[in-house]
């Protein structure tokens, strides 16, 4: 017997009949056990009994043989034609994060905006605002869903797709992030995690329970996650005004002490039936309940110029969200090798919001005692399916559909606390909205040769929106997009691991429902930098033609270098602009014309042993992204796409020795000035985030994880300005304090 290797497949060769037997990857063989196993094979393999020999003395001296094979050789990052990064569950929970947003900020090519509070925005290629598509189990996230309410422990993996594919919606100009909730079931799993988060601004406990088991053809699992946090901080704001000559004639210093609490509950039960005919039925439920309450006292000290309408204002806001998502999936495998995957998804949700405003007005301004309540409900039903054919060798031909209907209604009631029966100016507002969509697609992944594979796809998608309300005329919006897609992967011959990628895609961004509704939200101290907001029912979808190219080099196990470039030409670019409607300043989304986006990305990761002769288990990683863009309808300089991150970088390392593990991540995100319109400028500060973690395994059933985030204690800062000829420039700068945060988690297998 001898060991032979063919590419990535390793085999055992039996000398008698020259039989080759493939062996799985990392299969460990002890000589005595191997001899006993071979002794049972003569009839099955037609090997004469005399071919079986007892281990020799030489064999007895060999303690262990490692046979590397093909079962674990598949790597989606390296082998899939479509460019994809997959973050596994063990990497997702590594830092003990309580929000998936903290996980995503460390992913190469992905940045997360925010001010340290709720509602951070995920960006690929530096682009957010809907350019980056967020999916949950391959489908659009339900209405009202926020990523910062999703616990990382519920996630099986995160897929980052740089170029569009027909299977997922092509509303992915920058790319797609698909969050796959846990689907696999481990028999006898009983896991409990108890954690606590603390900083000078926020503190509170969190817990996670995972239970799973199997009984015959039925497998089940249940995951529960709860988090409760209290926070307190003081936000600072500076407002300035200068006249046309640049002379300061207004200065206000604002102090906004705020406090509140957050309570989050995620429940995810799963059932999997393996039927006798080979079919699989899966039920996956996701329940999300969260409560948010915030109290802020705004105090404005007017140093120069007139005071605001309400220099002393108390605001209390509460927000209650409840949502239920149910997925029923059916998988049918045919004798021909074909497969049908079909899924029905239902979502129901309710959001209740209440805000109380109370403040003494400036001279000539009446006092405010206002109560605003809104009650919104969301319902949706969707069906998706994919039929994969096995009729042609070397092809993965598939056809599918994706359709659904979403209904949403909202009623807002605005009253003076002392006159509860008298509507305030503008009256109560309510609306109902319906969104119908349908998509059909076809795709084929063709292995042309051993080194060359091609992906061809096409998707047609139509969306129709209807909104009617009591304060505006009924609005209709309809869009249809046909998206041809092409991707290819070529593995260079006569190289150890060099390969080239190329993609040509047609993608788009449809207007979100809230951006279409002419539903007005008023600011208290209305001005150019704190305007009201309203939707625009006349928005058109943005259409983009994209090109992606990459070179990848794999030189050792777990070692990668990648350099990629991308370009997007976008028509009907949409951005918010502020205008004066005759009485108040209002911000609304408008189509501004043609835009261009370009990007370069570098990424590398490798174990230290790939470059040095060492036994140290140290893994290193780094990435760098540079992005450019320009919008024709906006004068330069800095007329890039809204809030695009021009430069980002990550550095990271993971170390393991016995029962101890540790690691760290440094994330840099450049900010800078961006021109929103001919009159408006925005500014976002530079971010430097340092996160560290340690893990001690006391025994197979207990371990402790300690992690720290924002260890540099960097505050969040953003600014904006508005210039009006003849009236000067209004500037606003806000600082959100942030301090280092520590998390400790006790993890137990019960």
Image: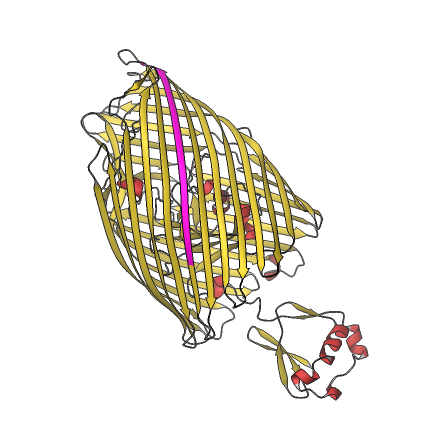
Quadrant of the frame with the N terminus:
bottom right
| Residue 343 image-quadrant placement | bottom left
Q: Main secondary structure of the magenta part?
A: strand
- All told, the count of numbered labels is 0
Query: Who's the residue at 29% across and 50% down the image?
Result: 436
The question of residue 229 being in magenta is answered with: no
| Residue 224 image-quadrant placement | top right
Q: Position of residue 353 (x, y in %)?
A: 39, 30
Task: Using residue 666 as the reference point, say whether residue 380 is left or right of it.
Answer: left
The question of residue 356 being in magenta is answered with: yes
Say whether residue 165 is visible: yes
Eyeballing the image, is 199 above or below 612? Answer: above
Which sits in the foreground, 569 or 457?
A: 457
Q: Position of residue 264 (x, y in %)?
A: 51, 37
Task: Using residue 534 as the reference point, say whether residue 17 is left or right of it.
Answer: right
Task: Using residue 270 as the reference point, say whether residue 338 is left or right of it.
Answer: left
Which sits in the foreground, 505 or 213?
A: 213
Which sits in the foreground, 140 or 540?
A: 140
Magenta part of the protein: which range?
A: 343-361
Q: Position of residue 501 (x, y in %)?
A: 40, 65
Which sits in the foreground, 333 or 306?
A: 333
Q: Which residue is situated farthest in the front direction here? A: 276
């Amino acid at each position: 017997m001898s060991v032979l290797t063919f590419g990535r497949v390793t085999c055992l060769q039996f000398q008698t009949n020259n039989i080759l037997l493939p062996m799985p990857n990392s299969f460990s063989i002890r000589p005595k056990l191997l001899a006993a196993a071979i002794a049972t094979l003569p009839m099955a393999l037609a090997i004469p009994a005399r071919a079986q020999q007892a281990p020799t003395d030489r064999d007895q001296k060999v303690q262990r043989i490692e046979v590397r094979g093909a079962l674990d050789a598949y790597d989606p990052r390296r082998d899939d034609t479509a460019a994809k990064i997959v973050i596994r569950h063990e990497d997702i929970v590594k830092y003990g994060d309580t929000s998936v947003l903290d996980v995503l900020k460390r992913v190469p090519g992905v940045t997360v905006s925010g001010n340290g509070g709720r509602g951070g925005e995920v960006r690929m290629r530096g682009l957010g605002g809907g350019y980056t598509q967020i999916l949950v189990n391959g489908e659009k996230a339900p209405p009202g869903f926020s990523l910062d309410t999703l616990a990382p422990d519920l996630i099986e993996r995160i897929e980052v797709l740089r170029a569009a594919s027909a299977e997922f919606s092509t509303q992915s100009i920058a790319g797609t992030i698909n969050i796959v909730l846990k689907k696999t079931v481990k028999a006898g799993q009983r896991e409990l995690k108890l954690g606590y988060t603390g900083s000078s601004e926020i503190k509170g406990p969190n817990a996670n329970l995972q239970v799973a088991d199997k009984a015959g053809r039925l497998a089940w699992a249940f995951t529960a996650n709860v988090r409760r946090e209290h926070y307190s901080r003081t936000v600072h704001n500076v407002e300035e005004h200068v006249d046309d000559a640049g002379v300061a004639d207004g200065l206000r210093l604002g102090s906004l002490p705020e406090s509140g609490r957050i309570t989050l509950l995620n429940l995810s039960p799963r059932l999997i039936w393996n039927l006798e005919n080979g079919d699989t039925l899966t039920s996956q439920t996701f329940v999300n309940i969260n409560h948010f309450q915030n109290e802020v006292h705004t105090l404005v000290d007017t140093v120069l110029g007139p005071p605001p309408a309400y220099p002393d204002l108390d605001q209390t806001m509460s927000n209650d969200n409840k949502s239920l998502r149910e997925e029923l999936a059916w998988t049918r495998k045919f004798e021909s090798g074909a497969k049908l995957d079909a899924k029905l998804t239902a979502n129901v949700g309710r959001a209740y919001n209440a805000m109380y405003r109370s403040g003494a007005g400036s001279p000539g301004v009446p006092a405010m005692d206002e109560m605003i309540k809104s009650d919104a409900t969301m319902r949706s039903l969707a069906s998706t399916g994919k039929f994969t054919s096995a009729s042609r060798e070397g092809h993965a031909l598939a056809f599918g559909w994706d359709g659904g209907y979403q209904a949403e209604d909202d009623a807002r009631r605005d009253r003076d606390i002392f006159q509860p029966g008298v509507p305030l100016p503008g009256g109560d507002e309510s609306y109902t909205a319906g969104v119908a969509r349908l998509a059909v697609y076809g795709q084929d992944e063709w292995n042309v040769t051993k080194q060359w594979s091609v992906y061809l796809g096409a998707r047609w998608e139509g969306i129709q929106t209807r909104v009617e309300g009591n304060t505006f005329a009924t609005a209709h919006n309809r869009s249809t997009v046909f998206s041809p897609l092409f991707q290819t992967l070529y593995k260079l011959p006569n190289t150890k691991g060099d390969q080239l990628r190329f993609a040509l895609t047609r993608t788009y961004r449809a207007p979100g429902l809230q951006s279409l509704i002419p539903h007005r939200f008023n600011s208290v101290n209305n001005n150019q930098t704190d305007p009201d907001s309203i939707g625009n029912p006349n928005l058109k979808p943005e259409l983009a033609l994209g090109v992606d190219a990459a070179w990848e080099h794999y030189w050792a196990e777990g070692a990668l270098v990648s350099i990629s470039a991308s370009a997007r030409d976008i028509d009907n670019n949409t951005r918010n602009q502020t205008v004066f409607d005759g009485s108040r300043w209002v911000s609304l989304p408008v189509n501004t014309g043609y835009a261009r986006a370009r990007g370069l990305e570098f990424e590398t990761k490798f174990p230290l042993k790939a470059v040095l002769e060492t036994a140290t288990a140290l893994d290193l990683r780094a990435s760098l992204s540079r992005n450019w863009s320009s919008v024709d309808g906006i004068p330069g300089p800095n007329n890039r796409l809204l809030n695009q991150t021009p430069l980002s970088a990550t550095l990271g390392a993971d170390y393991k020795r016995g029962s101890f593990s540790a690691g760290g991540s440094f994330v840099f995100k450049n900010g800078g000035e961006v021109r929103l319109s001919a009159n408006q400028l925005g500014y976002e500060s530079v971010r430097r985030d340092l996160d560290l973690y340690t893990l001690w395994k006391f025994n197979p059933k207990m371990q402790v994880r300690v992690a720290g985030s924002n260890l540099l204690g960097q505050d969040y800062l953003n600014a904006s300005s508005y210039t009006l000829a003849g009236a000067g420039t209004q500037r606003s700068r806000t600082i959100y304090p942030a301090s280092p945060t520590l998390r400790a988690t006790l993890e137990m297998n019960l």
